[in-house]
Image (cartoon, grey):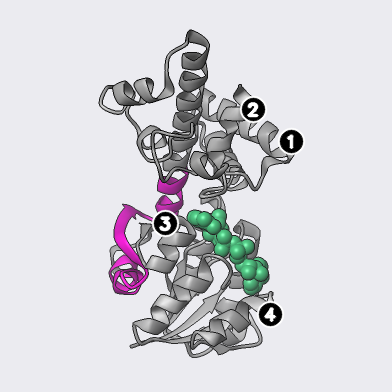
Amino acid sequence: MSVIGFIGVGNMGGPMAVNLIKAGHAVKAFDLSSSAVERAVEEGATAVGSAAEAAFESDVVITMLPAGTHVRGVYEDEVFGHARDGALFIDCSTIDVETARAVHASAAEKGFSMVDAPVSGGIMGAAAGTLTFMCGGSEEAFGRAKPILEQMGKTIVHAGGAGNGQGAKICNNMMLGIQMLSVCEAFNLAEKLGLDAQKLFDVSSTASGQCWSLTTYCPVPGPVETSPANRDYAPGFSAAMMLKDLNLAQGAADAFGANTPMGEKAAALYAEFCQGGSEGVDFSGIIKMLK
Ligand code: NAD
């Protein structure tokens, strides 16, 4: 069993840390929010006073932070200077590819192994230990990270070198955002045509329009009992989270010269939706704005 420094024990990091404790690891938790740390301590973590202290003498350091700037700051200012030789770093935050690669490069320069391992599966997946991890880093680093990630997730994919976990995550979520918009538009058109939503669902869920946004997250109430549309669009996956990921995808498309006109449009539509006060609404709720 390992000593794991866990930095960022919020909505996702908190339950992920709990699964590591259940698996028998000693978890040293740090977060800027004292209430987040208190919750982790109630579940068996040890509170520490800084990210540096979380890194000190830990075998593994895991970060689950809001954005690239937090990740870079925590590693550059605290973790690199205090981690023990041979420590493994796993960043599970969703951040931009360029920052992920820059932090990997600094870690490598200082002799540390690192994996970027963003997740999908949300808060429910974090609590149930069923997350999907998309990992970037060397074979050696991935091989060391995998047994730890298996204690928090069900599907662990090695997507390639440094930053490719983040790449896989934002490419997937760009598809998701575009597909959700396509499903919303089709249901809105069907309504104008006098075509019943259930009938469209019955056809498209077994035809070529089939996708996760239709069959698992159907944006109209009725056809999929568990979709957020049946609980007034309570998230699920919030519009703000979708906008974050679409903006990361557009940032990457600009930086690396990819043409993503549909991704650009999706980002603009979700920005409009969020600016209208719907940040906390499930991302499928955009059907109402499109209507
Ligand atoms: P959150 O805001 O609940 O948790 C982030 C935590 O980081 C907070 O508790 C905050 O206090 C802490 N923090 C910020 N800066 C810090 C610093 N310098 N040192 C220590 N702690 C610091 O967010 P979350 O929902 O847990 O999301 C975390 C990451 O996971 C994000 O990158 C998000 O995009 C990604 N993600 C979230 C979900 C989801 O459904 N919530 C799903 C997939 C991926």
Mark 4 in CB contact with mark 3 (< 8 angstroms):
no
The kind of residue tagged 4 is: Ser
Numbered circle sitting on residue 60: none
- Of all residues shown, which one is farthest toward the top? 193
Q: Which residue is mark 1?
A: 276
First in residue order: circle 1 vs circle 4: 4
Numbered circle sitting on residue 34: 4
- Of all residues shown, which one is farthest toward the left? 206
Q: Nearer the viewer, mark 4 or mark 3?
A: 4
Q: Which residue is mark 2?
A: 289
Mark 1 surroundings within 10 Å by alpha-carbon count, few (fewer than 14), some (14 through 19), many (20 or more) = few
Ligand 1 positioned in quadrant: bottom right
Q: Nearer the viewer, mark 1 or mark 4?
A: 1
Quadrant of the snapshot with the N terminus: bottom left
Kindly report the distance in space between the C-alpha atoms of the residues bearing marks 1 and 4. Answer: 32 Å
Mark 2 in CB contact with mark 1 (< 8 angstroms):
yes
